[in-house]
Image: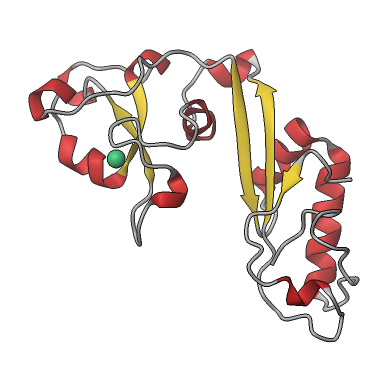
Amino acid sequence: MFEHKAEVLEADDCRIFRSARERVAAPLVIRLKRFVHVPRRFRRQVTNTFLFARDSYRCMYCGRHKAQLRGREFLTRDHVVPLSRGGENTWENVATACSQCNNRKASHLPEECGMHLSRKPSEPNYVELVWAVRRVTAVQAKYVAMFYGDEVLDALQRHAEDEQHGTAPEIEPVRHLALVS
Ligand SMILES: [Zn+2]
């Protein structure tokens, strides 16, 4: 069911897939990935979900991917021309920035502090949407159902419940099901 829609995010411990008895209570992570058309209603206003997806989950200044951020760093929404200087919250004026670059840039224009955008920002029509799901929250559920389909959402929620009750079925080898812990 997850084939082509999800992939392994962390698979360093394949041991738990071999036997139900050896299963450990590690959090379940499922990575959903899909190229999607961004509906017009989601383009009317900038949301971090689609902003980060538009920029491929990379800082547009230092180029680091979300997975390369350290410790307490995280992705943020940067206003290229800061709001305090008349910049607007529009797709053409926002960029994904790591917290470090965003702090460094502060209320400057990029060129004032020797920073460069790797690409000119624009409104996203298509993005590759990626979710790393541990527990399906209400907000995630909405997106997951919309972009990955009800069957994926159902499977996710069923598995999360099973796991919670300790009745998660023995998991098939990783290459068949993209369920990882
Ligand atoms: Zn950065």
Q: Quadrant of the N terminus?
A: top right
Residue drawn at point x = 64 percent, y = 44 percent: 139
- Residue 107 relative to residue 179: left or right: left
How has the structure been colored for display? secondary structure
Q: Position of residue 138 (x, y in %)?
A: 68, 48
Q: Position of residue 174 (x, y in %)?
A: 79, 59
Q: Residue 145 vs residue 58: left or right?
A: right
Q: Quadrant of residue 62?
A: top left
Front residue of 77/132: it is 132
Pick whichever, 138 or 66, lies toward us.
66
Residue at left offset 36%, top offset 19%: 119
Q: Residue at x 17, y 34 (%)?
A: 105
Classify 109 as above or below 165. Answer: above
Residue 121 in which image quadrant: top left
Ligand 1: image quarter: top left
* 31, above or below 106, in the image: below
Quadrant where the C terminus is found in the figure: bottom right
Q: How many marks?
A: 0
Q: Position of residue 76 (x, y in %)?
A: 36, 40
Residue farthest left in this picture: 112
Where residue 133 appears, as percent x and y from the top left, is: 66, 53
